[in-house]
Amino acid sequence: MPATLNHNVNLKHISRNMQIHFGNTGAQIEKASSGMRINRSSDDPASLALANGIRSDIHALAEGSRNGQQSIQMLQVAEGALSQITEMIQRMGSLATQSASSTYNDTNRPGISAEFQALKDEIDHIAEFTNYNGIHLLDSADEYTIQVGSSEASSDVARIAIGDMRAMGPELNLDPVTVDTLENSQDAIDQLETARLNIMSKRNHIAAFQNRLELNVKATATITAHMIATESDVRSADIAQTLSSLTSSQIMTQAASSLALEADIDVDRILALLQQ
């Protein structure tokens, strides 16, 4: 094509292509340096929306897992307190058995009865003061709700009620139980056994619930790891491909620069001829 002075079409084409290649080179450098394929929404809007959705799910799973772990700790506190109450009821059973024997007379029983009553008072004390983060666990019939997932579905919500485990409460019903007479002591043996079995049932329920939470936490950790990997795959750049594209863009930029120089030289030649 003949060189012209006022309208160098080749130079305009070359200039436009250089801008494109410079832009591509900059984008590839950014991807290679950050390791991310998507650095802004314009890079890939659909993939960015997908990655953000996955990240939101990851955060929800993390919160659910944290709730599960904290609930396990709460149940461990309740279990520890119930273990102490169990030991006290067993001791009360031993005292009732002693007092139910004719080898003890009414003169001996006040001492047994005093220890028996002290144990009942201590059961009430433990039940009333056992708490987790200010939440009383053993002195009411309240149900505790634990959000272990990201939705309101039954599989994502766990509920447990331990009950009022005070000696005076309806679960144990030990308030009227005494060992001050032979007859009362004999009645106390069966009542204490019923209370002990009730507590064991509660402890078994707590253990099963705790196992469920532990399995949920483990499953959530596995799911979260896979989702993190998926999000990384969506966002991350293929370094080999990125470097290949970067090299190609740099070569094209260098070629365009050389051609621009040649086109500019043509204009300089025309100006030199006009000056002769």
Image (cartoon, helix red, strand yellow):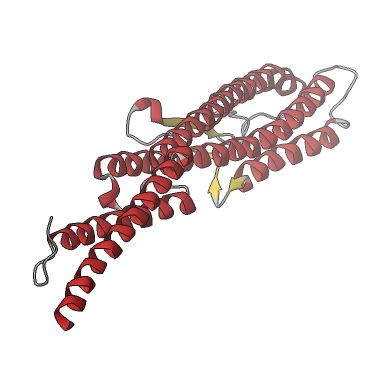
Q: Is residue 140 above or below residue 102?
A: below
Front one among 152 and 248? 248
Residue 3 in the image: state x and y as whole percent: 14, 63
Instruction: Looking at the picture, tell me which residue is in the foreground, 180 or 115.
Output: 115
Task: Residue lying at the far bottom in this picture: please name it.
Answer: 275
Residue drawn at point x = 17 percent, y = 57 percent: 13
- Using the image, determine if residue 165 lies above or below residue 21: above
20 lies left or right of 170: left
Residue drawn at x 68%, y 16% is 190
Q: Is residue 32 left or right of residue 272?
A: right
Q: Nearer the viewer, residue 66 or 220?
A: 220
Is residue 236 something that shows in the picture?
no
Name the residue located 69 percent from the left edge and 42 percent from the top edge. 121
In the rendered image, residue 162, in percent from the top left (x then y), is placed at 53, 31
Residue at the spot 43% in from the left edge and 38% down from the top edge: 241
Q: Which quadrant would the N terminus be assigned to in this image?
A: bottom left
The quarter of the picture where the C terminus appears is bottom left
Residue 186's x, y, as percent? 73, 17
Q: Is residue 2 visible?
A: yes
- Using the image as rendered, state which of residue 154 and residue 190 is in the foreground: 154
**Outermost residue, left side:** 6
Q: Of all residues shown, which one is farthest toward the right?
A: 103
Residue 71 in picture, x, y percent from top left: 55, 38
Residue 114 vs residue 274: left or right? right
